[in-house]
Structures are given as structure tokens and as C-alpha cells.
């Protein structure tokens, strides 16, 4: 009763290779060789395979600005397109990037659910709905693997929040687990995924790398024949060996150090190890890492053009009181306001981060799109927290004279172990050649040319004690205070310390920071540090007053609001849904000028918009990737239509949100809401959200004409009644008011994207296999009788209705 099926590939032809390996070789192969690669065995024609973070762009084995990556829209932005064809192309673009960087296995997509908007990694995941997440995840997987690169859907399973993620125990009933949290993984297995990542957390008392869920349903029911790779450092003991955990990363894994001895003395069954080795060999065959099996060459992709298109398709027009699209020819004065307008967030924080060659901000995009208008900019409100990296154009490497800085790695006695010339003052070492583990001091040196005369807050961020010297004078000798116990958060979004430095325009200063290596436990071979400048200490009221003045003098004001790296990131959850800083006050003040205001929201997750009724338009742009600014300008000027619909319900206030518990109680996080998350919970509670699941406006109008059944397919016909071509997302929901089992008020069973010229009709064909109507009761069961289907433009805008016998 599944939507699609996959056949398990035979590994019999690989047994002759297995039989050539010693026990020690087999034990080595199921552990990483280092942070990002697997062990090569040239004697059997096996090269190392390279894995890389990659749910929103493929970073490669080095976290290095000298080898930039395509920065694609985040998971929530992709999901907002509701477009499986776009998701397939997204996977194909990721595959092209992977092969360019020598990567065989991409660690993505992230298909955990938006159980609560407070989840810190919400931006990286697709949706609150299992059907939407499943369809997009399966298409993404096919896009990668059709082009020869392995996908790794993650994190299996119930890893839907960040607080105590390494140790929390999620308690969830089997029906909820099957219908919601396992469902996207099941669909990616049906799509043939070659790998899956197991998560840090426990489910019902057993850590996931040792959990029976790795065997049932993953292997035994779904027929998964790929490799289960652990989240980094998630393997805790040898008990993961019989539990169908195939690859321990990074390696060599301390928990499996005596794996060979454990097989030799009978504590472990060698057959369990052999199954893992065969799966590793099958993966190598699939990605072209085994002699005689060439890698598929990915189709060429214009990555930058695709990112721009995908950002447009995933941008949601929440509100439009007739002001959009702008009449570019009539605009003479435009005010662009907001720190995120100039310093846009194109991606969320954490392991999904990539380093693009360049990014286009909304300010850049608007200036380019409106060459005939005077565009004035004001920051309006400070969003940034902590230091931001120095401008490359203002840094000179003292050793080379080129833009950038010199990094020197010193040993125990101060001897130079290694040097690097870098083009950024925000650096991460997580793999690569630098001798991080052997270093005792790491030194950053640059000559910085101040932009203007005045005081700057110069300092550093990191998990390491450090000393800041300016022109040879010691100004800081401090250690940033790490909050919480999540090493990942401390590593990827470290705290800052600063000192006030008086600078003069035209007079460079010599900046030197000496970092002492701190004990990072499992991350002892890694380091993250930034030398930079913290936000100016201008009176917030003055910044708002300047913005009001600019808006008053303009024909239109575009205010870009958003989050920062301290709000949305891997490693911690959110505590509220508010925009940071004085941004709400800023929008209210600009709206009060009477100038029409368009607000662009630059956030990967829902934020509260208390001023929504006071502005003319609101565009939710998510984290739109490196072409975010061009996409925003395309939409504002009408060069493109906003293509997105909300993949997650947006609340008017946190108090209205049905599911907010993301913090474990004595180590246990109970999913007491069961199958009622997202819009299901909103419909059940009767609370009114700010914007419903599936909501999104376009630049044309539509009539919903008919819905008819053709076998197991629903055909929905819509007519474009507006004056321009447009996109519509046809959404189909099921209801069962007289059900004998507990159900949501309604649930998504299918969707399709259609496009039509002005005056034309389009018909969406939505496949509805019987599984979409089934519930879990120790097996999948379709309740006899009729379901009510509703089709329309959101979960609460459903003009078409018909009865549907799912089992006929």
C-alpha cells in the first residue's frame, strides 16, 4: 500500500571482494578515515569516498572561502515552492556542485518536521506536513542520484528540535511515529536513497545509532539497501553494530576502536560486520568509487541562474494591498531600510553553512533593478549580535601584501607548524590540512584600513581563549563565555568579546589575535574563530529617526527585517518568535509616515509580525541563497511572480502556537500532541493563525472550476482570470468527519503546481494512492467508506469538494 516501491539491490556480486579483506580491514571500512572521508582499500580497487554537508549547497571537505560553494535557498524556502520538479532540479544542481568538489555523498536533504516553530533548525527542514516533506524529499534524492551522487536524508528520526539533542529521549507513540516522522524517510527509501543519517537523540529510551528502528521498518519493511551513516560522533558503543548502524563518522571512531577484537572474541557476530561492508561496497559501486564502475557525470547546471529562480519560486507574498508589483518607471525616490537589506542572511547557521563566492543583498538587487530611481539606504535597527567578519577589501595580509590575513599555527614550544594565507577573518577548520590538534596557539594577523574615523568595537569570537593586540598593544586577554553544553553551538556560533578602538580613516592598524587551543572533546581536531567588528553603539532611537526621514522623502519604502545567527541555527532552539532588536518599532515608525511600505522578511522560520495590518505588502523571502537580492527585486518589480506558498503555519503570537515544548523534562521530550502538529493542531484548537498553511498570493486571480476523479488521480481545473501569466499551487486535503479512529480535522494528501497564461485554464493531475488515506494500527489500514476531498489554495481556502472511496 506504498506510493512507490524500491527493490533491494543484491550484493552477492560483491562477496568475492569481501572475502579478500582481513577482519581489521573490514572493521576499518565501516569507520571514517577522518572527518569527511572513508577508508580506501586499493588492493580491492576501492578509493576513499568523500562525504560533505550539503542540504543547501555542497561545502566540500574543506570549510574554505578559497574554494567557494553555490549557496542555494534553505530547506524551508525550497519547500515553499511546493514544486517537486524544482526539488529534483535542486538535487541535480547539488550533484553538479558535489562532483565539482570531489564529493560522493551529500549529507541531505534534512527532512525532519517543523513540529514547533521554536525548533532551531527549522529553516533547514522542509515543512510541518509529512506529505509535503516526503514528496519534496524524494524528488531531491532522485535529483542527486540521477546524477551519480548519493543522497543522505537526515536525521533518522524524531530529531525535530535542538535542546539537549545529543542526549534527549523522544517518547512518541508508534502511530505518530509512523504517520508523521517516519513518513518522509519512507518515501525517500522508496525513491531509492543510497544512504540515510541516523540522529543523536534516543527514541523510546534507546539512542538512535543502536535503535531497532534502523532494522524495522527501515531495512525489513521498506527494503532499504543503503548505508546508515551516523551523525558526527553519534556512535556511542559497540551495541550499534548489531543494530544496523553501518558507518561511524567521523573516524576512526573511538566507540568502535576494538570492533575487530570484539568479533574475534565472540562479543559480536562477524555476519553483522560483513553486511555493513557489503553495503559500503555497494555504495562505492553506485558513486563510482569502486574499480570498474565509473561515476555518472552530472548534467551541467547554471547554478547562479537556478538559485535566483529557486529563490523566486520559494518566496511567499503574505499580503498585498495593491502596491505590488511596483511600477518601476514611475518611481523617483526609494528608501531601502534595515540591516538585513544590506547584510542579508542567505542561509541559516550550523553545519549547513557554505561559503559563496558572492552574495546579492536586497539593497544590491533593488539598486540594480531601479537604475532610474534614487535609492537611499538607512540601517534603521541593528540586528547583528557579536562580531562580524572584516571587509576583505580593507584587510591586507602582512606577509603577502594581498587582501586577507596570515594564519600561523604554533606548537608546544612556539615553533611554526603551518601557515595559511586566507581571504576571510571568519574561519572554520573542520577537516583539511591545518594541524589543529597538534597546535597550541593559532595566530591571525592582518592590517586593517578603517572605513571612517571614530570608535569601533574590535574583537573576536570563538570557543578559545584569546589575546587581541592592535599596533602591538594588548587590548584584550579574555575567553568568550560559552553558554550551554552543546559543543556544536559553541563551535559554529561562538560568543564574542570586544574592546573599543579609536581609529582614523586612512590610517591602517595592525591587528593580531592569538588563540589558545581549547579542549573541544570530540571536536579536538576542529576550530572556529572570527576576528571582526561588533555593531555600532548608536542610539536606537536615532537610527529609527533617520529611517523615518528617508521614508518620508520617498515614493515607496522597502523595509527588510529578519533574524540573525543567534536566532536560527543548529545547536539551540528559539525562545520566542520575535524579530531581534528594535525591528518591530522600526516598521511601525516607517509605516506611520504615510509612505507605502513593503516589508521583506528575511527569516527561515516563522516570526511574529505585530504591524502586519499597517503595511501595504509583506514578502516572506526565507533564506534565499546567494541570489536572494536579485530574487527580491524580480518580485517587487513584477519581473517575476512570487511563487511560494507557506509550508508551515505562521502564528500571530507565540501564545497561540499549539506545540511549543522543545525542552526535555529530565532528559525526556514527550510528543504528547500525537498526530496533531502544524495546521492539524491549529485546526483542532480553533486558534486563528496570522497566515494559514498553504497561503500565498500571486499577481493574478484564479477561478477554481472543477475536480473530477480519474482512477486514483484527482484532476483539478483552474482558470487564470487575471491580466498576466501566473502560478497556482493546487492543494488537496482529506477529511473524515465520521471516522472510527482519531484523525486530524483535515490532512494534505496531494498537491501540484500549475501555470497558465492570462485567460487560460490549466489542469492539475494529483495522484492519490490509497496509502494517503491510511492510518497506522499495527499495519496500514484504510477505513472503509467515503472520505471528503477538498481542493483549493490553502488549508482554509478550499472551494472544490467531492466524495472519495479510497479502497475502490
Image (cartoon, grey):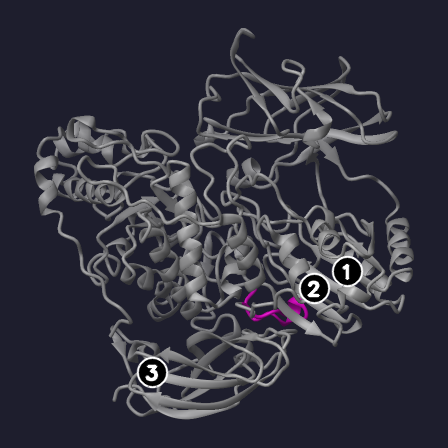
Element under disc 3: strand
Q: Residues within 10 Å of mark 3 (few under 14, many from 20)?
A: some
Taking depth in this image into account, of 560 and 760 the one nearest to the observer is 760
Give how far apart the Cα atoms at labels 1 and 3 are.
Answer: 43 Å
Q: Are marks 1 and 2 in contact (CB under 8 Å)?
A: yes
Task: Name the residue that disc number 2 marks.
Answer: 636
Pinpoint residue 35: horizontal percent, then vertical percent: 39, 32
Q: Is residue 96 left or right of residue 470?
A: left
Task: Name the residue that disc number 3 marks.
Answer: 713
Q: Is residue 687 left or right of residue 177?
A: right
Residue shown at 44%/68% (left/top)?
Answer: 132
Residue shown at 27%/42% (left/top)?
Answer: 295
Task: Name the residue that disc number 1 marks.
Answer: 558
Pinpoint residue 475: horizontal percent, then vertical percent: 77, 20
Give how far apart the Cα atoms at labels 3 and 2 are.
Answer: 37 Å
Residue shown at 37%/84% (left/top)?
Answer: 714
N-terminal of the pair, mark 3 or mark 2, is: 2
Q: Which region of the structure is painted magenta?
A: 648-660
Taking depth in this image into account, of 610 and 309 the one nearest to the observer is 309
Residue 605 vs 40, above or below: the answer is below
Q: Is residue 69 visible?
A: yes
Q: Residues within 10 Å of mark 1 (few under 14, many from 20)?
A: many
N-terminal of the pair, mark 1 or mark 2, is: 1
Task: Report which quarter residue 8 is drawn in.
Answer: bottom left
Q: Are marks 3 and 2 in contact (CB under 8 Å)?
A: no
N-terminal of the pair, mark 1 or mark 3, is: 1
**Does the stretch in magenta take in 718?**
no
Give how far apart the Cα atoms at labels 1 and 2 are.
Answer: 9 Å
Amino acid at each position: 500500500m506504498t506510493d512507490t516501491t524500491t527493490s533491494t539491490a543484491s550484493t552477492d556480486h560483491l562477496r568475492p571482494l569481501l572475502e579478500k579483506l582481513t577482519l581489521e580491514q573490514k572493521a576499518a571500512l565501516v569507520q571514517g578515515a577522518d572527518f569527511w572521508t572513508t577508508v580506501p582499500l586499493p588492493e580491492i580497487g576501492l578509493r576513499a569516498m568523500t562525504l560533505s554537508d550539503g542540504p543547501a549547497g555542497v561545502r566540500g571537505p574543506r570549510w574554505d572561502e578559497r574554494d567557494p560553494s553555490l549557496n542555494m535557498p534553505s530547506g524551508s524556502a525550497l519547500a515553499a515552492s511546493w514544486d517537486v520538479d524544482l526539488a529534483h532540479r535542486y538535487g541535480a544542481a547539488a550533484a553538479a556542485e558535489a562532483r565539482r568538489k570531489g564529493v560522493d555523498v551529500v549529507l541531505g536533504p534534512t527532512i525532519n518536521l517543523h513540529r514547533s516553530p521554536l525548533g532551531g533548525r527549522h529553516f533547514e527542514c522542509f515543512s510541518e506536513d509529512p506529505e509535503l516533506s516526503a514528496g519534496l524529499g524524494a524528488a531531491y534524492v532522485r535529483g542527486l542520484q540521477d546524477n551519480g551522487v548519493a543522497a543522505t536524508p537526515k536525521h533518522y528520526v524524531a530529531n525535530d528540535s535542538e535542546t539537549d539533542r545529543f542526549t534527549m529521549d523522544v517518547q512518541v507513540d508508534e502511530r505518530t511515529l509512523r504517520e508523521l516522522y517516519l513518513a518522509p524517510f519512507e518515501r525517500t527509501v522508496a525513491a531509492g536513497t543510497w544512504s540515510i543519517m541516523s540522529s543523536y537523540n534516543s527514541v523510546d529510551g534507546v539512542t538512535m545509532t543502536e535503535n531497532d528502528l534502523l532494522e524495522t521498518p527501515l531495512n525489513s519493511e521498506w527494503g532499504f539497501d543503503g548505508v546508515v551513516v551516523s551523525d558526527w560522533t553519534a556512535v556511542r558503543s559497540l551495541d550499534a553494530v548489531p543494530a544496523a548502524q553501518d558507518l561511524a563518522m567521523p573516524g576512526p571512531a573511538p566507540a568502535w576502536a576494538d570492533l575487530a577484537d570484539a568479533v574475534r572474541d565472540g562479543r559480536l557476530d562477524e555476519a553483522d560486520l560483513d553486511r555493513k561492508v557489503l553495503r559500503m561496497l555497494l555504495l562505492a559501486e553506485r558513486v563510482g568509487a569502486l574499480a570498474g564502475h565509473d561515476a555518472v557525470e552530472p548534467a551541467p547546471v547554471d547554478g547562479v541562474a537556478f538559485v535566483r529562480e529557486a529563490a523566486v519560486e520559494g518566496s511567499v507574498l503574505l499580503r498585498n494591498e495593491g502596491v505590488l508589483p511596483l511600477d518601476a518607471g514611475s518611481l523617483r525616490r526609494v528608501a531601502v531600510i534595515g540591516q538585513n537589506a544590506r547584510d542579508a542572511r542567505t542561509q541559516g547557521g550550523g553545519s549547513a553553512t557554505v561559503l559563496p563566492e558572492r552574495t546579492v543583498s536586497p539593497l544590491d538587487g533593488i539598486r540594480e533593478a531601479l537604475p532610474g530611481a534614487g535609492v537611499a539606504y538607512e540601517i534603521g535597527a541593528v540586528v547583528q549580535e557579536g562580531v562580524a567578519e572584516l571587509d576583505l577589501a580593507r584587510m591586507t595580509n602582512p606577509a603577502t601584501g594581498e587582501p586577507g590575513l596570515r594564519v600561523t599555527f604554533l606548537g608546544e614550544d612556539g615553533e611554526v607548524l603551518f601557515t595559511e594565507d586566507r581571504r576571510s577573518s571568519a574561519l572554520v577548520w573542520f577537516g583539511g590540512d591545518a594541524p589543529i590538534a597538534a597546535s597550541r596557539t593559532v595566530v591571525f594577523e592582518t592590517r586593517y584600513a578603517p572605513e571612517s574615523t571614530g570608535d569601533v568595537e574590535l574583537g573576536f569570537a570563538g570557543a578559545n581563549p584569546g589575546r587581541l593586540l592592535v599596533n602591538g598593544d594588548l587590548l584584550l586577554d579574555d575567553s568568550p563565555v560559552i553558554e550551554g553544553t552543546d559543543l556544536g553551538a559553541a563551535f559554529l556560533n561562538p560568543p564574542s568579546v570586544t574592546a573599543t578602538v579609536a581609529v582614523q580613516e586612512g590610517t591602517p592598524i595592525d591587528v593580531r589575535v592569538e588563540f589558545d587551543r581549547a579542549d573541544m572533546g570530540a571536536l579536538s581536531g576542529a576550530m572556529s574563530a572570527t576576528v571582526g567588528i561588533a555593531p555600532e553603539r548608536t542610539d536606537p532611537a536615532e537610527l529609527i529617526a533617520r529611517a523615518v526621514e528617508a521614508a518620508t522623502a520617498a515614493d515607496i519604502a522597502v523595509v527588510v527585517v529578519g533574524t540573525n545567527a543567534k536566532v536560527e541555527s543548529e545547536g539551540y532552539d528559539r525562545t520566542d518568535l520575535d524579530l531581534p532588536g528594535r525591528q518591530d518599532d522600526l516598521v511601525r515608525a516607517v509605516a506611520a509616515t504615510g509612505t507605502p511600505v513593503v516589508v521583506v522578511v528575511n527569516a527561515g522560520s516563522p516570526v511574529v509580525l505585530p504591524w502586519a495590518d499597517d503595511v501595504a505588502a509583506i514578502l516572506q523571502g526565507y533564506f534565499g541563497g546567494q541570489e536572494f537580492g536579485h530574487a527580491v527585486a524580480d518580485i517587487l518589480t513584477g519581473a517575476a511572480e512570487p511563487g511560494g506558498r507557506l509550508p508551515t503555519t505562521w502564528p500571530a503570537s507565540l501564545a497561540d502556537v499549539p506545540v511549543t515544548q522543545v525542552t526535555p523534562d529530565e532528559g525526556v521530550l514527550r510528543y504528547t500532541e500525537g498526530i496533531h502538529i502544524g495546521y492539524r493542531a491549529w485546526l483542532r484548537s480553533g486558534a486563528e493563525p496570522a497566515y494559514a498553511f498553504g497561503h500565498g498570493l500571486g499577481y493574478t486571480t484564479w477561478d477554481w472550476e472543477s475536480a473530477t476523479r480519474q482512477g486514483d488521480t484527482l484532476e483539478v481545473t483552474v482558470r487564470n482570470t487575471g491580466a498576466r501569466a501566473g502560478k497556482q499551487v493546487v492543494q488537496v486535503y482529506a477529511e473524515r468527519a465520521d471516522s472510527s479512529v482519531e484523525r486530524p480535522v483535515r490532512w494534505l494528501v496531494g498537491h501540484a503546481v500549475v501555470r497558465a497564461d492570462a485567460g487560460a485554464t490549466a489542469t492539475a493531475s494529483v495522484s492519490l494512492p490509497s496509502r494517503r488515506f491510511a492510518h497506522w494500527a499495527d499495519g496500514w489500514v484504510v477505513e472503509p467508506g467515503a472520505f471528503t476531498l477538498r481542493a483549493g489554495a490553502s488549508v482554509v481556502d478550499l472551494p472544490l469538494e467531492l466524495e472519495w472511496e479510497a479502497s475502490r
